């Protein structure tokens, strides 16, 4: 990502917004009546391009993990199991990409603490409570008949996650960019002296 993200942003990010589209709401003051302009959290073009790259990265990572899980569910031999597990490490980019994507999708950056607090609680509940009970129970029930059932179940959950991630869309907004000379009338002082 260190090398891919700058290239992607340079290629897909629209030009920066003009002063009319700045993050200050035009003519609005703060809620307390002071003269300080109200700052509106609006994603910039680079933020949107970065979010699209994060979404693409998460989708590809989920796909690679799901391919590995489906292959592991086919009850492969030990050397192939190791090779597939190594292949599945290519899907390790999904957690950071999803965290970055979630951070860009919240309406206000001031809510990031709540967001990551909630995500860490969900992660802790899933890894310490739900996953051991669910996967341990399925493995105990199916180890005598078909041991790789847990991989098939994980692949099913990954399909559900991929479907949920496919519902995330970004709006395509046209950006007004001023080109050429400004049409504003400017008052200038003349440097010529009137002859009398």
Image (cartoon, rainbow, N blue to C red):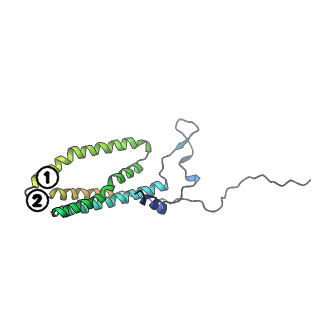
Identify the image quadrant of residue 192.
bottom right
- In the image, residue 83 sits, relative to residue 138, either above or below, namely below
Specify the quadrant that holds the N terminus: bottom left
State whether residue 166 appears in this view. Answer: no
Where is residue 61 shown, x and y percent of the image? 31, 59
Q: Which residue is mark 2?
A: 146
Q: Residue at x 43, y 59 (%)?
A: 3
Cα separation between marks 1 and 2? 10 Å
Identify the image quadrant of residue 183.
bottom right
- In the image, residue 3 sits, relative to residue 119, either above or below, namely below
Outermost residue, right side: 196
Q: Residue at x 28, y 45 (%)?
A: 122
136 with respect to 66 (left or right): left
Where is residue 88 shown, x and y percent of the image? 26, 59
- Depth order, front residue of 83/132: 83
Secondary structure of residue under mark 1: helix
Categorize mark 1 by other alpha carbons within 10 Å: few (<14), some (14-19), many (20+). some
State whether residue 194 appears in this view. Answer: yes
Secondary structure of residue under mark 2: loop
Outermost residue, front side: 79
Circle 1/circle 2 CB separation < 8 Å = no
Categorize mark 2 by other alpha carbons within 10 Å: few (<14), some (14-19), many (20+). few
Where is residue 27 shown, x and y percent of the image? 58, 45
- Depth order, front residue of 148/45: 148
Label drawn at residue 49 = none
31 with respect to 77 (left or right): right
Where is residue 8 shown, x and y percent of the image? 44, 61
Q: Which residue is mark 1?
A: 138
* Mark closer to the chain start, 1 or 2: 1
50 with respect to 92 (left or right): right
């Amino acid at each position: 990502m260190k090398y891919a993200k700058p290239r992607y942003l340079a290629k897909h990010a629209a030009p920066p917004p003009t002063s009319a589209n700045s993050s200050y709401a035009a003519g609005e003051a703060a809620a307390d009546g002071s003269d300080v302009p109200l700052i509106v959290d609006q994603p910039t073009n680079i933020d949107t391009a970065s979010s699209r790259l994060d979404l693409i990265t998460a989708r590809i990572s989920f796909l690679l993990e799901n391919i590995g899980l489906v292959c592991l569910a086919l009850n492969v031999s030990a050397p192939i199991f190791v090779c597939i597990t190594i292949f599945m490490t290519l899907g390790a980019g999904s957690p950071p990409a999803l965290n970055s994507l979630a951070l860009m999708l919240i309406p206000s950056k001031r809510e990031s603490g709540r967001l990551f607090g909630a995500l860490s609680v969900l992660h802790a509940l899933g890894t310490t409570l739900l996953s051991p009970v669910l996967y341990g129970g399925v493995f105990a029930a199916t180890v005598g008949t078909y041991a790789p059932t847990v991989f098939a179940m994980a692949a099913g959950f990954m399909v559900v996650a991929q479907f949920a991630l496919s519902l995330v869309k970004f709006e395509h907004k046209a950006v007004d960019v001023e080109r050429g000379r400004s049409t504003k009338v400017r008052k200038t002082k003349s440097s010529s002296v009137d002859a009398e």
